Amino acid sequence: MQEVLATLPDNDLARPLPTGTTIGHVHVHVHVGDIAAGQRFYRDALGFIDGMTGDTMADFHANGRFKHRIAINTWQGTGASQPPAGTAGLRHFTIRFDSPERLQAALDPVGGAEPHPDGHRVRDPAGNAMVLTA
C-alpha cells in the first residue's frame, strides 16, 4: 500500500480522484447485519448468483461467465450497525447492468431508489449505498 501511495505527486490523500476516473475491477466486501436479508437483496432483487455461503459470509458472482463479484459479511457482528457518518468508508459503489431492461428488473423489487446523476441510488438492508445504472 505504501508503494501505491508513494506514487502520489503531492501526497494529498484528501483530494478526490479526478473527474472521469473509473476503476474497472473491484471485489467488494460489504458489512451487513443479517446474511439472510443481504442474500434476499443481492441474490433475489439484484440477480447476483450465489458463489459461496456460510454463517458469516455470502459471495455472489455477477453471472456464471466471469468473476466480477460482491461479498457480504457479518464480520463486524450480526446485527452490528454501519459506521457513523463522517468516518472512513465506502460512500457508494456502482453496479452497471448490461441493459435498461435488466436495470429496471432490479429496481422494481428493490424499491426506494433515489435519483443520482449516474443512475439510481439504492441501499441494501444494512444501509450500504450503491448506484444502479445501465
Image (cartoon, rainbow, N blue to C red):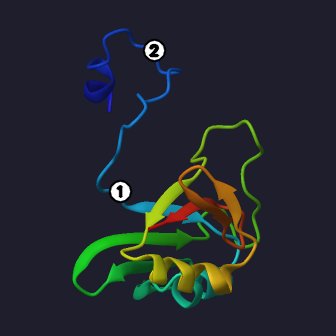
In the picture, measured across the screen, residue 25 lies left or right of residue 93, that is: left
Which residue reaches farthest left? 65
Which residue reaches farthest top? 10
For the C terminus, the quadrant is bottom left
Label 1, on which residue? 26
Q: Is residue 55 visible?
A: no
For the N terminus, the quadrant is top left
Q: Residue at x 61, y 47 (%)?
A: 91
Mark on residue 132? none
Q: Nearer the viewer, residue 86 or 76?
A: 86
Q: Nearer the viewer, residue 73 or 42?
A: 42
Give the residue type at disc 1.
Answer: Val
Q: Residue at x 56, y 70 (%)?
A: 73
Q: Residue at x 44, y 70 (%)?
A: 70
Mark on residue 12? 2
Q: Nearer the viewer, residue 55 or 122?
A: 122
Q: Quadrant of residue 107?
A: bottom right
- Pointer 1 and pointer 2: residues touching (CB < 8 Å)? no
Q: Quadrant of residue 61?
A: bottom left
Gap between marks 1 and 2 measured at Cα: 23 Å
Residue 87 at x, y = what percent? Answer: 69, 37
Q: Residue at x 52, y 87 (%)?
A: 43
Image: 48 above or below 6: below
Residue 17 at x, y = what percent? Answer: 43, 30
Residue 22 at x, y = what percent? Answer: 35, 44
Give the residue type at disc 2.
Answer: Asp
Local crowd size for mark 2, using a 10 Å CA cut-off: few (<14), some (14–19), many (≥20) = few
In the picture, measured across the screen, residue 22 lies left or right of residue 7, that is: right
Q: Could you tell me which secondary element the residue under label 2 belongs to?
A: loop
Q: Could you tell me which secondary element the residue under label 1 belongs to?
A: loop
